[in-house]
Amino acid sequence: MADRSFLNWPFFEDRHRALAEALDAWCAANLPVDHGDADAACRGLVAMLGDGGWLRHTGAGAGETLDVRTLCIIRETLARHDGLADFAFAMQGLGMGAVSLFGSPGQRAWLERTRAGRAISAFALTEPGAGSDVAHTATVAERVQGGFRLTGEKTYISNGGIADVYVVFARTGEAPGAKGLSAFLMPADVAGLSVVDRIEVIAPHPLAHLRLDGVELPESALIGRAGDGFKIAMSVLDVFRSTVGAAALGFARRALDEALERVRKPRVSGATLADYQMVQGHIADMALEVDAAALLIYRAAWTKDSGAARVSREAAMAKLYATEAAQRVIDTALQLHGGDGVRHGFAVESLYREIRALRIYEGASDVQRVVIARAALGA
């Protein structure tokens, strides 16, 4: 069983500990699911998570606020049990984060559907020529009578092709660069939206390259104010970036558990791998990385929940360290498994494929280093 002593840290309240215990029991009864058809698996997981009441934490209803510690606990726990379940949960939050934080009452009707698991959401920011560099977004939202006409392309969009609703970012031109972007709520059935390509990756998830060919949206589709798109995107990432680290932490905890089980097994000689000091050193390093990552993640989450307007520095540190550390922990666990570490059907092989993308999405590791350095330099 994964170490749960961290729940006694002062970052948490009794409600967080109760949630963690209830969710772990739910996961043990319902996960993992069959990943053979990633689209079908994600649709099923969204429905299951909605029925279980877990998706209500992905958005803030009237009079509510997002609790980042709760989001992190849920992502860590789901990732430890099933990476695709974590993905399904996370995208309901990230996909509708802009609506949760800035949406109008009319737009929030979609939020209630995604929180209930009755609709799937997506966050359409990345483009073929603008990944981490949001300021170079090329998709254009031209003002027309009664609303906007959107033209451009988005790629590596999680839930692309299966989402019911997208939050899409486009250039409205109020100012150069990042200051001229706006956010829009776009139903998946609008005319002019098409899936150019479904993208296959090493850990199967629903991903797509989308084209917006003169998509017309009403004025009511604008989230917040025109020109506030960059601020909205960064505010959403400020909340959810720490949770990416939490998912990596869940993967790392599972890898450590798998490694501990492996090295404790008696061999033909009667000895165990755990008897060797070199192996003990590897286990010590893994345990250290897990705890250090957890401290950074839950510090960032607690700081945000305590009322900090922005936690860009703390969230960047949490995501950078946790994802890089999880890669190291999982790689060590695989090494300790020997040949079985690269065999399909073994947990560490799946974890090895799952972790790699977390060092890229929602701000690649080098982007997080830039954020941290600028904060340290006072830039």
Image (tube, rainbow, N blue to C red):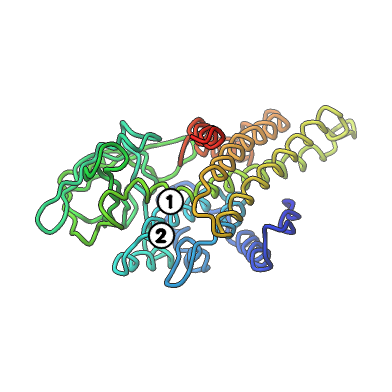
Viewer-proximal residue, 183 or 341? 183
Left or right of 223 on screen, residue 69: right
**Res. 180 image quadrant:** top left
Amino acid type at circle 2 is Leu
What amino acid is at disc 1? Ser
Q: Position of residue 332 (x, y in %)?
A: 69, 31
Q: Residue furthest bottom?
A: 63
Q: Going by the image, does 218 lie left or right of 117?
A: left
Q: Which residue is mark 2?
A: 101
Task: Provide the residue designation for mark 1.
Answer: 235
Mark 1, Cα crowd under 10 Å, few <14 / some 14-19 / many 20+, is many
In what element is the residue under mark 2?
A: helix
Secondary structure, mark 1, is helix
The part of the image, by quadrant, that contains residue 156 is top left
Q: Which circle's residue, 2 or 1, is located before the other in the chain?
A: 2
Q: Position of residue 130 (x, y in %)?
A: 33, 34
Q: Are marks 2 and 1 in contact (CB under 8 Å)?
A: yes
